Amino acid sequence: MGFSEGQIEVNWEPQAGQLPASATINKHLEAGRYDEAIPLLRTRLQLEPEHVECLYSLGMVYSDRMQLPEARELLSRAVQLDPGDANAQVALGIAALRDNDPDAAQGPLEKAVVLEPRNPFALRTLGQLLLMRDNLPAALTHLRAAATVAPEDPINLFTYAQGLLAIEGESHEAEADELFQRALRLAPTGELAEKIKHHQRRLAERVLRTNAQDQPRMDAVMYLSSALETYRELDPAGQKQLLLGEVAAVGQQGLALNNPDPKHHLKHYRGGSTVSGLQVACNLYVGVQLLLPGQDAGIDLAREYEMSRGMVGG
């Protein structure tokens, strides 16, 4: 440290046996220790205000912490200093999206795709943005490309499937269902998994209605009638076991409602039976109506349920 022309000069040199500052910062970032990384990044930027990597890293940290004005300012400086940094362009676009500013997000994301046409994060994020803006053809182009370069990205597979199902006048149910299944295998638990399962159920119901030409499904009516009779024959403990211990658990794994082949064994249904996905869904629907009224069963079988009640009485 010394004085020169009224300013303090600082020479930052690691002591022997210590990691350089950049290596220490990276270790904190990789471990998610943001509280330790932030002061080091700030100090580094005080010494080197145009250090692009530090601008990018601190901007990413602030973006993850939803300190979005600070994140956007730092990332904007990073791309101004190095317009060819595709990752910084993506990060700036994501920060703008998180800040509910899609107009500002689109430019950086498009630049990132031009810079690195096979960057999966750039492709996925731009595809998501274009999907939000109802530009389906362009969105699907980028989501499809992202699925090619990053086939094990469950978020992109899920988004790509949603895009396919949004196309009017075309049938992409089979392709979307395959994408949902792949995404669920890659992310079997957590918030994303629950979203995938929800959309799988809605897709299965959509196909169910399409196949029946929007008329009541008589096979579902028969399965619902059988389920009603089964629940009535069981004592309260058996009813709960059938609903919560069996059909709800099976339903969490995803049901192929339009495949008639039986493959799910239910111990409490008819004394023990192997049934199809639609039969499981019907048992689930009846159980929710009887034991958990008012809750969403995940599939709309209201018309068929009323018909089944009329058949079995009550």
Image (cartoon, helix red, strand yellow):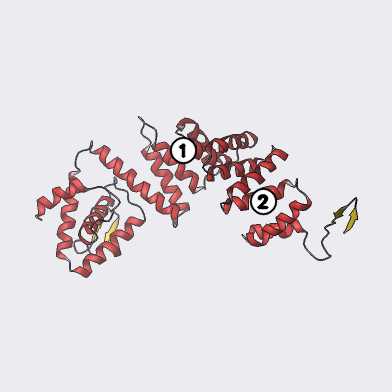
Residue 232: x and y in percent read 15, 62
Q: Quadrant of the N terminus?
A: bottom right
In the image, taking residue 191 as reference, residue 142 lies left or right, namely right
**Which mark, by number, is residue 233?**
none
Q: Which residue is mark 1?
A: 132
Neighbour tally class for label 1: few under 14, some 14-19, many 20 plus, Cα within 10 Å = few
Which residue is more in the foreground, 121 or 241?
121
Neighbour tally class for label 2: few under 14, some 14-19, many 20 plus, Cα within 10 Å = many
Name the quadrant containing residue 234: bottom left
Q: CA distance from mark 2 to mark 1?
A: 27 Å
In the image, taking residue 275 as reference, residue 199 lies left or right, namely right
In the image, taking residue 299 as reference, residue 139 lies left or right, namely right
Closer to the chain start, of discs 2 and 1, is 2
Residue 90: x and y in percent read 60, 42
Examine the rendered structure and indicate whether residue 190 appears above or below residue 108.
below
Identify the residue shown where x is 69% and y is 48%: 55
Name the quadrant containing residue 149: top right
Q: Which residue is mark 2?
A: 57
